[in-house]
């Protein structure tokens, strides 16, 4: 159920990059509809099949891009795998950051789309043994702009980050970033200086696509110091603080999806997480193993899920 709601707001799953795996075995496609009052949309529709890929409709019209889903229906998830924001590679943290940048920085999606297109063209030239330099000025200009937008968003996030981190973890985690190339040179200089390396690899090793958010505690990488439970709290702090920032920028708080929020946490940390979530005053969709779960107060609606079927209680 949570995965369906997330797909409706992001156009992808939070568990897998392969949307076709969400299609019921023996079926050709999946379809999800959502209706809302008081938001910027009245109806959303997402379909996916193995031939045509993803189709998105908003208020009865075809969407121009998946980005329109995030604008119409912002949604954030806290699932038992939230620790991957800390433990896994840069791609997870870039996705986390770029969702926030999208809501804060106008034009970010268009710049990222153009950057990705030019990056593919430079990589194709590298693989074909051709001169990649014609693509470098535009790639560098867009890459610098994207890095600046991400940096501004991280700066804007700082107050939310510190408050949420203090409430949940109480550890002084430093939030920094690596922009994707050396601070001592421009991106254009880096692309020029590393052409030989890039030709050997057949791909571009410097640029905004290599951006990473750096989490440190006492000068060491946070993933090397924190326990799994602490990593989950840190990941939750990242998700909640970014949701707060996106909500303040977009004038509406994202819907929060919570999958078994107490997993791997003791009572004190679970209570702190619940308190922080409740303070956001947005819509919550929460899964629990027991129907008497009431940490977030009495639900407006409750459902029972069994053998893939959902019924209203």
Image (spheres, rainbow, N blue to C red):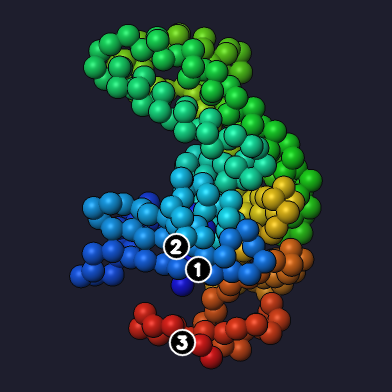
- 171 lies left or right of 47: right
Q: Residue at x 66, y 54 (%)?
A: 243
**Tag 2 or tag 3, which sits nearer the N-term?**
2
Decide if residue 223 is in sight here: no
Q: Earlier in the sequence, mark 1 or mark 2?
A: 1
Query: Among all residues in the image, which is located at the extreme left?
Result: 26
Q: Name which quarter of the figure residue 76 lies in.
A: bottom right
Q: Secondary structure at mark 2?
A: strand
- Residue 285 lies, in percent from the top left, at 58, 72
Residue nearest the viewer, comparing 228 with 180? 180
Give residue 142's position: percent from left, percent from top: 54, 23
**Label 3 belongs to which residue?**
311
Q: Are marks 1 and 2 in contact (CB under 8 Å)?
A: yes
> Who's the residue at 54% across and 69% down the image?
35
Please name whichever residue, 179 or 58, is drawn nearer the observer in this view of the structure: 58
Per the model, the C-alpha gap separating discs 1 and 3 is 17 Å
**Circle 1 is placed at which residue position?**
34
């Amino acid at each position: 159920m949570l995965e369906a709601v997330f797909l409706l707001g992001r156009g992808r799953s939070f568990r897998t990059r392969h949307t076709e795996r969400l299609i019921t075995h023996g079926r050709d496609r999946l379809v999800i509809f959502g209706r809302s009052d008081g938001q910027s949309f009245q109806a959303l529709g997402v379909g996916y099949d193995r031939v045509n890929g993803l189709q998105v409709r908003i208020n009865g019209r075809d969407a121009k891009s998946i980005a329109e889903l995030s604008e119409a229906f912002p949604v954030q998830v806290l699932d038992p795998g939230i620790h991957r924001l800390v433990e896994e590679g840069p791609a997870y943290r870039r996705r986390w950051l770029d969702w926030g940048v999208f809501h804060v920085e106008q034009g970010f999606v268009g710049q990222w789309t153009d950057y990705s297109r030019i990056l593919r063209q430079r990589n194709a030239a590298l693989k074909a043994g051709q001169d990649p330099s014609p693509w470098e000025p535009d790639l560098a200009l867009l890459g610098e702009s994207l890095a600046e937008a991400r940096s501004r968003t991280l700066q804007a996030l700082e107050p939310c980050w510190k408050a949420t981190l203090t409430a949940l973890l109480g550890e002084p985690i430093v939030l920094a970033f690596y922009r994707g190339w050396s601070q001592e040179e421009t991106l254009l200089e880096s692309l020029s200086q590393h052409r030989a390396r890039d030709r050997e690899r057949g791909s571009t090793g410097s640029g905004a696509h290599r951006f990473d958010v750096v989490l440190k505690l006492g000068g060491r990488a946070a993933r090397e110091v924190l326990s799994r439970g602490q990593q989950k709290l840190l990941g939750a702090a990242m998700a909640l603080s970014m949701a707060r920032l996106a909500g303040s920028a977009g004038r509406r708080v994202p819907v929060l999806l919570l999958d078994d929020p107490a997993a791997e946490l003791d009572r004190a940390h679970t209570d702190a997480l619940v308190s922080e979530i409740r303070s956001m005053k947005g819509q919550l969709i929460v899964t629990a193993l027991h129907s008497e779960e009431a940490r977030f107060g009495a639900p407006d609606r409750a459902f029972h899920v069994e053998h893939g079927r959902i019924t209203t209680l």
